[in-house]
Amino acid sequence: LPGNELAAAVVFAKLAGAAIAGKLGTASYGNVPSYATSNASDEIEGLFGQKGSHKLGLVRKNLRQAFNSQAHTAASDEQHVGLVHSLREQFGQIALHDKNRRFNTELLEALELDRLLDVADAVAKASVAAL
């Protein structure tokens, strides 16, 4: 950002962050069912415990490449179903290198990719069923 814009952005962000933190401290979030926190905790511990050789970024890259192709035929749609299944198996064999419990972007990427694989599976199967 040019000139004073950077300073203004920093000051605004600091003020906005302080205001948000103040409101979060007094907010009521209701009761979260214990099974929800338990399931989330189990999922995270499972990801941390995985020992494998597949790379998270490579699984994501292969998923992106598969669904960015322009040609959609019955054969390619069925191949997508098989590919998503294969990528799901690879995801089960990734290893997270960052074991930190705070600000762990690798963990966030793994959780996101897990959900993307669910969506990709649904899209691929729906595309085959629509033909």
Image: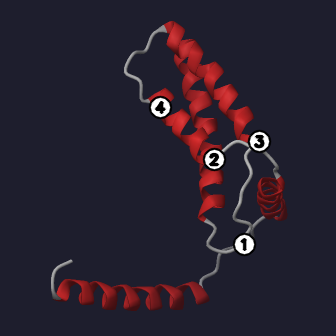
The answer to whether residue 131 shows anywhere in this view is no
- The reply, left or right, for residue 33 in relation to residue 18 is right
In space, the residues marked 4 and 1 are separated at their CA atoms by 31 Å
Three-letter amino acid code of the residue under disc 3: Gln
The residue singled out by tag 4 in the image is 65
In space, the residues marked 3 and 1 are separated at their CA atoms by 20 Å
Q: Are marks 2 and 1 in contact (CB under 8 Å)?
A: no
In space, the residues marked 2 and 3 are separated at their CA atoms by 9 Å
> Which residue is found at the position 78% from the left and 45% from the top?
52
The residue singled out by tag 1 in the image is 101
The residue singled out by tag 2 in the image is 56
The residue singled out by tag 3 in the image is 93
Three-letter amino acid code of the residue under disc 4: Gln
In space, the residues marked 2 and 1 are separated at their CA atoms by 18 Å
> Which residue is found at the position 77% from the left and 41% from the top?
93
> Which residue is found at the position 61% from the left and 72% from the top?
103
The answer to whether residue 73 shows anywhere in this view is yes
- Please provide percent x and percent y for residue 7: 26, 90
